[in-house]
Image: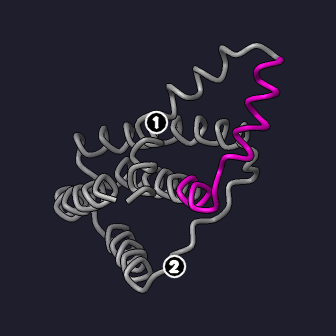
Amino acid sequence: MKIKAFLLTILLAVPTLAMADNKTTDKTADKTKTTQKASLTEDDIKVVAHVKHVNDMEIQMGKLAKTKGTRSVKAYGNTLVKDHTANNKKLTALAKKKGITPIPADEPMTEEQKRDHQKMMNGMAKLETLEGAAFDKEFIPMMIEDHDKEVGR
């Protein structure tokens, strides 16, 4: 449960944390960096890796939507790419300040996570074969399900 709360906090607070870090003095920044690096647990690092993976997947899905969907889904795809690219930049900067460079790969650990990952890969492969309204019909429910799952983590 602690990881779920941390994930949601990271997803919602990355811009705030990044701005707060920029407001520290040099002396405070050096002390804070040392404290922050030491305060990250292995679970925290896994959460950062997972958030990076989610952003990367959203960017891929957005790019696909920009080329395969109807006009409104293309616009949504553009938003996905723009927002998750910005989130990745902020997450990478925050991770660097926390001493996590590079961000490690997010590896599915449990059988359920492995099944979910395979389901996503299969869904993306299917989407690549569709266009227009047929693409939208598959894409939108997939995005809703995946976003609900991430928010519920």
**Residue at the spot 37% in from the left edge and 47% down from the top edge:** 66
Q: Quadrant of the C terminus?
A: bottom left
Magenta stretch secondary structure, dominant: helix
Q: Nearer the viewer, residue 143 or 134?
A: 143
Question: The residue tagged with tag 1: helix, strand or loop?
Answer: helix
Q: Tell me if residue 112 is in the magenta stretch.
A: no
Assess disc 1: are there few (<14), some (14-19) or many (≥20) residues with their C-alpha within 10 Å of its C-alpha: some
**Residue at the spot 76% in from the left edge and 13% down from the top edge:** 25
Left or right: 143 with respect to 55? left
- Please state the total of marks drawn on the protein image: 2
Q: Position of residue 114 (x, y in %)?
A: 44, 81
Q: Which mark is residue 82?
A: 1
Q: Tell me if residue 45 is in the magenta stretch.
A: yes
Q: Is 93 drawn above or below residue 112 in the view shown? A: above
Residue stretch rendered in magenta on the structure:
27-48
Amino acid on which disc 2 is placed: Met
**Residue at the spot 41% in from the left edge and 80% down from the top edge:** 118
Q: Which mark is residue 137?
A: none
Amino acid on which disc 1 is placed: Lys
**Residue at the spot 47% in from the left edge and 50% down from the top edge:** 59
Kindly check if marks 1 and 2 are in contact, taking CB atoms under 8 A apart as contact.
Answer: no
Question: The residue tagged with tag 2: helix, strand or loop?
Answer: loop
Q: Nearer the viewer, residue 40 or 48?
A: 40
| Residue that numbered label 2 is attached to | 109
For this orientation, the residue located farthest to the bottom is 111
Q: Position of residue 126 (x, y in %)?
A: 33, 74
Left or right: 102 with respect to 49? right
Q: Is 13 drawn above or below residue 111 in the view shown? A: above
Assess disc 2: are there few (<14), some (14-19) or many (≥20) residues with their C-alpha within 10 Å of its C-alpha: few
Q: Quadrant of the N terminus?
A: bottom left
Which of discs 1 and 2 lies nearer the camera? The answer is 2
Between disc 1 and disc 2, whose residue precedes?
1
